[in-house]
Amino acid sequence: MTMVTQPNMGGLHLFGTGNSAHIVAWNGGAPNAKWTSLEDPNATCDNPCQTRSMNPEAKYSYRARQAGMFPGEESQKFAHGDDLDYFCRSLQDALKDMGMDTVGYRRDPLDPTKMIDVLTQYPRLSKSAMKVESAWCLPKYDSYDTSNDRQAKRFLLASLSTDLKKKIHYKSGLYKSGRTDPCFVDVLFVLIEYERPLSIDASQAMVDAVRAMTPSQFPGENITLFVEAIRPKLAHLEIGRSWDSMNNPALCRTLALAGGGSNYEYNSELYSLLNKLQDECQYITHLTNQEKVVHMASKSLGWKNIFDIAESHYVAQVVPGRIRWPPACH
């Protein structure tokens, strides 16, 4: 049986029995804070796409790990101005499936004893901070990490529209003579900061946009559409520590006013929640934005709680054949 090197970030898996038995390496998972092994010592291979082999038949998997999302479908690829949060979540899922997600982890700049997935935490990170963390972890890569990083980088670029791919290619300095190629995370942050420049003004502009949104901007004051539109923005602001939970009462009031003031079946619980929010806000003024988010969530007074209540009462009033939502009855 051919000897296979054990990867630091993964393990070995035995396939087959008898004469057909063979061992292959597999990759994937969150690394520990020293980049010496996976955080979970009991992790196992979840699917064959995580395996690595020099068998000629493995060339198809090798190509898939570089083909990007939606290969051959230019119209489906990420273009400038598209939903960056959704793209990063989709990319994260794809890398996990193929055992390449490990190279998307870096030490948390706020707590170097922890590792974070940059594809979910990027709103609070910067390109310069990630360069520092990349410089720390790249020397710790084994041969599997190096290969996965190279393929993840190609997968990322192949997921971009032709025009955007060219811009990111040149802005990141890929394949530039006389220098080492940037790693996957560093190229990713070139894309992120091109799509969403890191500045206080940009964050405040998003906060202002959220505060200006109302259900009346959607057909029939559709609460579900309102929540779907505003939720990704709030999630981004929360991760980036830019959402001040002192804004939660205003958000609750905006939703309580939807559907007509006399719609007590819908708004009574929201007004009750509003009173609790206003009371609790008196005790959080000294906290940071992140501490406020954690505190309010622990009291079931976070923006997600507001949305859950508003949407559940709205949905109950728009049952087909039994519609009672006033704006939808006109």
Image: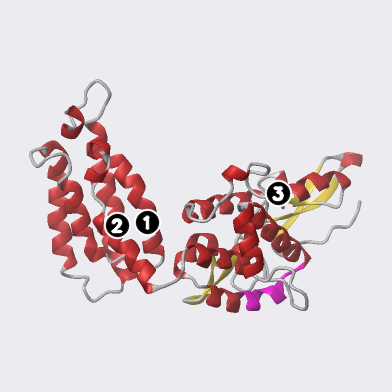
Q: Residue type at mark 3: give it.
A: Ala
Residue 137 lies in the magenta stretch? yes
Q: Which residues are magenta?
A: 134-142
Name which residue lies at 30% across and 58% down.
209
Residue 317 in picture, x, y percent from top left: 21, 31
Is disc 2 surrounded by few (<14), some (14 to 19) or many (20+) residues within 10 Å?
Answer: some
Taking the image as shown, residue 24 lies to the left or right of residue 229, namely right
CA distance for labels 1 and 2: 7 Å
> What residue is rendered at 77% in x and 78% in y?
178
In the rendered view of the protein, which quadrant contains the C terminus? top left
Relative side of 17 to 78, left or right: right
Q: Is residue 13 left or right of residue 287?
A: right
Q: What residue would you read off at disc 1?
A: 233
Query: Vertical placement of 216 versus 274: above or below?
Result: above
Distance between the alpha carbons at the discs numbered 2 and 3: 36 Å
Q: Which residue is mark 2?
A: 210
Which residue is tagged 3? 67
Badge 2 vs badge 3, beta-carbon distance below 8 Å: no
Rendering colour mode: secondary structure
Amino acid on which the number 1 mark rests in the picture: Lys
> Looking at the rendering, which quadrant does residue 29 occupy?
bottom right
Is residue 181 located in the magenta-colored stretch of the structure?
no
Q: Position of residue 49 (x, y in %)?
A: 71, 46
In the figure, residue 173 lies in which quadrant?
bottom right
Residue type of the residue flagged with mark 2 = Val
Labels 1 and 2 touching (C-beta < 8 A): yes
Residue 148 numbered tag: none
Question: Helix, strand or loop at disc 1?
Answer: helix
At x 63% / y 58%, what residue is drawn? 165
Gap in Å between the C-alphas at discs 3 and 1?
30 Å
Residue 177 place in picture, x, y as percent: 77, 75
- Density class for disc 3 (Cα within 10 Å; few <14, some 14-19, many ≥20) is some
